[in-house]
Amino acid sequence: MQHPRADKFIKRWGGKKDCLIEMMHDIQNEYNYLPEDILVEVSERLKVPLAQIYGIATFYKAFSLTPRGKHQIGVCMGTPCHVKGASLLVEAIGRHLGIKEGETTKDLKFSLATTGCVGTCGLAPVIVIDEEMYGNVNINQISKILKKYKK
Ligand code: FES
């Protein structure tokens, strides 16, 4: 049985094995993760071992095998950020969204993670949402910052 969700990704890249990573990027972009049933279908139709696909999925950080939120929130936990209260930010964001670090909201809008130093220690504590960086963040700003992404 062919999976209609896999079909469009395979067709878009002409069903070529060489374009496997591009297909995986497309799937990731559409679902914010790589659903297992689609990967199985891709594996069968391209005749690429599923283990190879999982190998690629786990090697590249851009891919996720579990559902991820549309918006990725990263709280820097490098020493300067930690000293300036990054843990409180993790708690405040978690409370606001009803999730813990490493989790994703049920509506798949947000995922919350901690990161290593993102290189702007002078602005500690720092959070990064998708590609956007926020420095000198305090817990009173969390609600306002997140509101922007809730639309
Ligand atoms: S420790 Fe947070 S930006 Fe460097």
Image: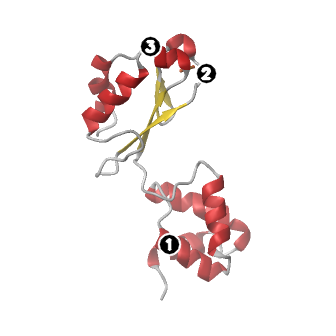
Q: Secondary structure at mark 3?
A: loop
Residue lying farthest right? 18
Q: Which quadrant of the view contains residue 94?
A: top left
Q: Quadrant of residue 140?
A: top left
Instruction: Please rate how many residues cluster around mark 3, counting C-alpha atoms within 10 Å: few if below 14, some from 14 to 19, many from 20.
Output: some
Q: Name the colour scheme.
A: secondary structure
Residue under numbered circle 3: 84
Residue at 65% from the left image edge and 79% from the top image edge? 46
Quadrant occupied by the C terminus: top left
Indicate the position of residue 124 as horizontal and vertical percent values.
49, 15
Answer with left or right where residue 125 lies relative to residue 18.
Answer: left
- Tell me whether the residue at label 2 lies in contact with that at label 3, contact meaning CB atoms closer than 8 angstroms: no
Circle 1 residue: 38
User: Is 61 left or right of 32, judged from the image as shown?
Assistant: right
Q: Residue at x 40, y 47 (%)?
A: 70
Task: Name, please, the residue furthest toward the bottom.
Answer: 1
> Label 1: how many residues lie within 10 Å, few (<14), some (14-19) or many (20+)?
some
Q: Earlier in the sequence, mark 2 or mark 3?
A: 3
User: Where does label 2 land, which residue?
Assistant: 119
Disc 2 residue type (three-letter): Gly
Ligand 1 shows up in the quarter that is: top right
> What residue sits 29% from the left and 52% below the top?
106
- Work out how far the residue at label 1 is from the one at label 3, CA to CA, in angstroms: 43 Å
15 lies left or right of 140: right
Distance from Cα at disc 2 to Cα at disc 3: 15 Å
Against 31, residue 149 (above or below) is above
Which is more foreground, mark 2 or mark 3?
3
* Callout 2 crowding tier (Cα within 10 Å): few <14, some 14–19, many ≥20: few
Secondary structure beneath dot 2 equals loop
- Closer to viewer: mark 1 or mark 3: 3
**In the image, residue 4 lies at what x, y percent?**
45, 78
Mark 3 or mark 1, which is nearer the start of the sequence? 1
